[in-house]
Image: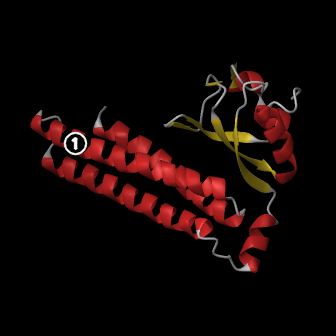
């Protein structure tokens, strides 16, 4: 892994953490807050890997000291953002109440975030995202997938969903329950 590739992955996961943290607070969703905690552990490990890779690239003279310094600062800054997202998620986990006006203004928007685990009897299991056409058929768009400890942000159409995958999706509030039923195998037709 090159340090730039690692930084890109760090950036994607950190953006996801911020989205999840705000969503956890706004939609009063403890599960989303817990996902932020799991992602934070990933960010810490990835940051260590990137710092090590940067040092190795300096030794091999693949990058100069100035570029290494910039990359290292970017990695540390990204981790600071992730730590901020963790603090936001902690608000939800500690059950601190948001001001009602803030919650209401966000809830008036048409978009909701949801988290669901794919059951082995789900119509999603074993099928590619492009084949399912979830955004057009259900209204919900899969923004990230967690498979065991691995995360895929912004999965492409050729990504195949497997049982046990955790799907993070957003879409209209009225589409959320059908999406959850499909993922859990309680509804069989998209």
User: In the rendered image, which quarter contains the N terminus?
Assistant: top left
The quadrant in which residue 80 appears is: bottom left
- Report the residue at 32% width, 48% height from top: 47
Residue 105 on image: x %, y %: 77, 72
The local crowd at label 1, few if under 14, some if 14 to 19, many if 20 or more residues have their Cα within 10 Å, is: few
- Report the residue at 54% width, 54% height from top: 36
Task: Pick whichever, 70 or 7, lies toward us.
Answer: 7
Do we see residue 26 in this rendering? yes
The quadrant in which residue 156 appears is: top right
| Left or right: residue 71 compared with residue 100 | left
In the image, residue 12 sits, relative to residue 22, either above or below, namely above
Q: Which residue is mark 1?
A: 52
| Left or right: residue 147 compared with residue 179 | left
Task: Pick whichever, 16 or 34, lies toward us.
Answer: 34
Q: Name the image colouring.
A: secondary structure
| SS at circle 1 | helix
Do we see residue 19 in this rendering? no
In the image, residue 17 sits, relative to residue 100, either above or below, namely above
The quadrant in which residue 112 appears is: bottom right
- Report the residue at 78% width, 34% height from top: 184
- Report the residue at 58% width, 60% height from top: 21
């Amino acid at each position: 892994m090159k340090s730039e590739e690692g930084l890109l992955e760090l950036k994607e996961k950190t953006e996801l953490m911020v989205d999840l943290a705000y969503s956890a607070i706004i939609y009063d969703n403890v599960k989303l807050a817990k996902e932020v905690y799991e992602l934070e552990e990933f960010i810490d490990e990835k940051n260590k890997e990137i710092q090590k890779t940067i040092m190795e690239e300096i030794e091999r003279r693949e990058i100069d000291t100035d570029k290494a310094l910039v990359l290292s600062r970017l990695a540390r800054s990204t981790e600071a953002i992730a730590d901020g997202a963790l603090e936001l998620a902690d608000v939800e986990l500690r059950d601190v109440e948001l001001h009602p006006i803030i919650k209401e203004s966000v809830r008036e928007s048409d978009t909701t975030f949801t988290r669901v685990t794919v059951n082995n009897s789900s119509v999603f299991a074993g099928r590619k995202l492009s084949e399912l056409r979830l955004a057009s058929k259900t209204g919900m768009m899969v923004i990230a997938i967690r498979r065991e400890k691995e995360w895929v942000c912004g999965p492409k159409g050729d990504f195949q969903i497997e049982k046990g995958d955790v799907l993070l999706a957003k879409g209209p509030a009225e589409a959320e329950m059908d999406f959850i039923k499909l993922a859990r195998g309680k509804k069989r037709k998209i």
